[in-house]
Amino acid sequence: MRIAMISEHASPLAALGGIDAGGQNAHVAELAGALAAAGHEVRVYTRRDSPDLPTVMPMGERIDVVHVPAGPAQVLPKDELLPFMGAFAEWMAADWRTEWSPDVAHAHFWMSGLAAVTAGRQCDVPVVQTYHALGSVKRRHQGAADTSPPRRIAYERELGRAVDCVIVQCQDEIRELLRLGVPRSQMTLVPSGVNTERFSPDGPSVPRDRSLVRILTVARLVERKGVEDLVRALPAVPGAELVVVGGPPRAELADDPYARKLLRLAETSGVAGRVVLAGAVPSHEMPRWYRSADILAATPWYEPFGLTALEAMACGVPVVATAVGGLADTVVDGVTGDLVPARDPARLGVALRRLAVSEVRRLSYAAAAVDRTVHSYAWPRIADRLAEVYASVAGVATETTREAVA
């Protein structure tokens, strides 16, 4: 099949850890790669955010990234992109009519969905939607601090009814969409995946001080990711260091307000010497960072899926995570890691300390984590499941369906 993937703010080519660069970027990049490896042609449409970017940039065999001229060619916060989605849709529809006609479009994030549905109706292309995050959840947790466009929730409700299929990534998302008024019949549950060849226990790791237990967290430097909760929990885990990957490049951390806030909190909490801010890390370096860790901490207040936990599990790292969103599906409590309530540094500290002092528990969790990722979340398996959804909405027979008929 020819598959158009729309990811308006999250380019698969972006370095991870920036303000709007995280799990969605990695998800789109890995899914595109797995679909291409299965023989499909993939074009990823993302907004041009630099005048130096070519219109079409090859990302791999049978994968192109298309930089759509919609709005100024500069980096903008994703919450400011809605006014440019009409131009995005019109440019993409023209591309589909004249350059590359897809069998199906897969929109990632709600604004991508608006562009995909608009272009899809003009070009008779079916649309599959993955939200990656829901405005209703964001509003609940951020309240007045939520900078989403006012009609986001209404748009998400309308999209859920307008597209041909909604791909949900966890059970919690199903419940949220049902409350929103999206019919269950519109939804198909397919989780995100992990590249088990790149992310594996075998391979080099970042050098570290072996006299300390390393707790790693990988997160954008924003309040809702719960990094402050980790700093507050660290006094309960003597002999451990907290390494934070994410945010601006390391050389720019001194100018980042939230990075400075974390370092001040570390001082007042008495753990200044045990908190290390590593800054943004290129995606190809992440396996080395995961392998350097004894524990991966994923402590957001809410999380649509939680890709970092899955990547760490694939590398044989046990996880302590907040029991929110997709993390409650991915991490099997007491088997591959431990789940704790969100925004509870005391409970978080207890869980981290219990795991930090028990190498046997860490080894047991690590073995189960690798087994779970390989058998349930490897990208070829996930890509095959999504290809079946694409084929269904596009009316295309796949090898699997042909075998079933035969």
Image: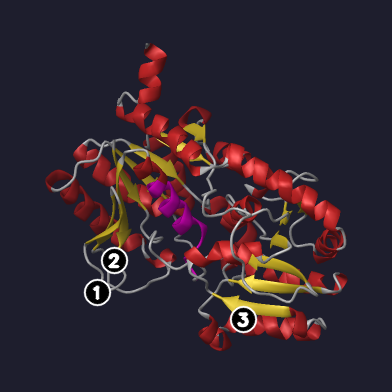
The residue at 19%/41% (across/down) is 101
Task: Please tell me whether residue 31 belongs to the stretch shown in magenta.
Answer: yes
Figure check: 343 above or below 395: below
Horizontal side, residue 305 vs residue 401: left or right: right
Q: CA distance from mark 2 to mark 1?
A: 7 Å
To which residue does mark 3 refer?
259
Horizontal side, residue 386 vs residue 172: left or right: left
To which residue does mark 1 refer?
51
To which residue does mark 2 refer?
48
Span colored in magenta = 19-33
User: On residue 308, which mark appears?
Assistant: none
**Helix or strand or loop: what does disc 2 sit on?**
loop
Quadrant of the drawing holding the C terminus: top left
Residue located farthest toward the top when viewing the structure as drawn = 406
Which amino acid, mark 2?
Answer: Arg
Q: CA distance from mark 3 to mark 1?
A: 29 Å
Q: Is residue 331 visible?
A: no
Horizontal side, residue 182 vs residue 67: left or right: right
Q: Residues within 10 Å of mark 3 (few under 14, many from 20)?
A: many
Q: CA distance from mark 2 to mark 3?
A: 28 Å
The residue at 79%/48% (across/down) is 364
Figure check: 240 above or below 97: below
